[in-house]
Each structure stands twice: as C-alpha cells, then as structure tokens.
Image: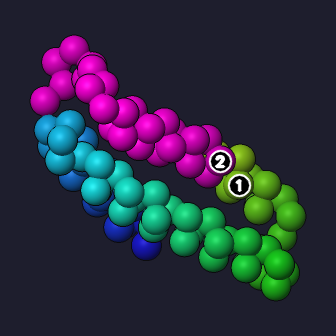
Amino acid sequence: MWIEVIEATVMAAFLTPQEKLPYVRVAIRKFDALKIMMMILWETKSLDDKRYIALATPMETIGKMFGGWQGQLAKPNSPGKPGEK
C-alpha cells in the first residue's frame, strides 16, 4: 500500500494542475487506509507504543501536507507555483 501512495503522489507531481487532483485524492485515500491499519496493529498490541509514536508523528505531518496540496488544487483559480506545469 505504501507503493500505491508513492505512485499516486509521483503521478500527481508530474501532471498539470487540472489533472493532479484525482491522483492526490487517491494518495490521501490510500494513506488514510495505512493509518487505520497502523492503528489496528497498535490496538491489537502488534505494534508497541514507542514504535507507534515514532511512526504516527511523521505520518501526521504527511497527512497535513496531502491535505494542503488537495486544498490548493481544489480552490478555483488557484495560482500554481512558478515553473509548475
């Protein structure tokens, strides 16, 4: 599933702003599924607290980044970054 998140992210990175949003949404959906799987592992004690915290902290940051990217793409007439296709 990590591969699918990476694949959707890379696809979005190389598309025009109008084409990016569906791929960003796929990446977010797959990433959310990973977070749920990780919580299940933690709740079933298959993942200890220390490892869960070590993984959850950067995953929270990644989730915020995906959300920001989606928000920028969803805004009508949002300007792209200079040099962005």
Residue at 36%, 40% in the rendered image: 74
Left or right: residue 63 versus residue 77 is right
Please report the bounds of the magenta region as a residue range.
59-85
Q: Position of residue 70 (x, y in %)?
A: 41, 43
Q: Which quadrant, please, contains the C terminus?
A: top left
Q: Position of residue 26 (x, y in %)?
A: 36, 62
Marks 2/1: CA–CA distance: 6 Å
Q: How is the image coloured?
A: rainbow
Residue identified by numbered label 1: 56
* Amino acid found under the numbered disc labelled 2: Glu
Q: Is residue 80 magenta?
A: yes
At mark 1, the secondary structure is helix
Answer whether residue 6 is visible to the viewer in this image: no
Residue identified by numbered label 2: 60
Considering every residue shown, the one lying at the far top of the view is: 82
* Amino acid found under the numbered disc labelled 1: Ala
Q: Quick one: label 1, few (<14), some, or many (20+) residues within 10 Å?
A: some
Left or right: residue 43 versus residue 34 is right
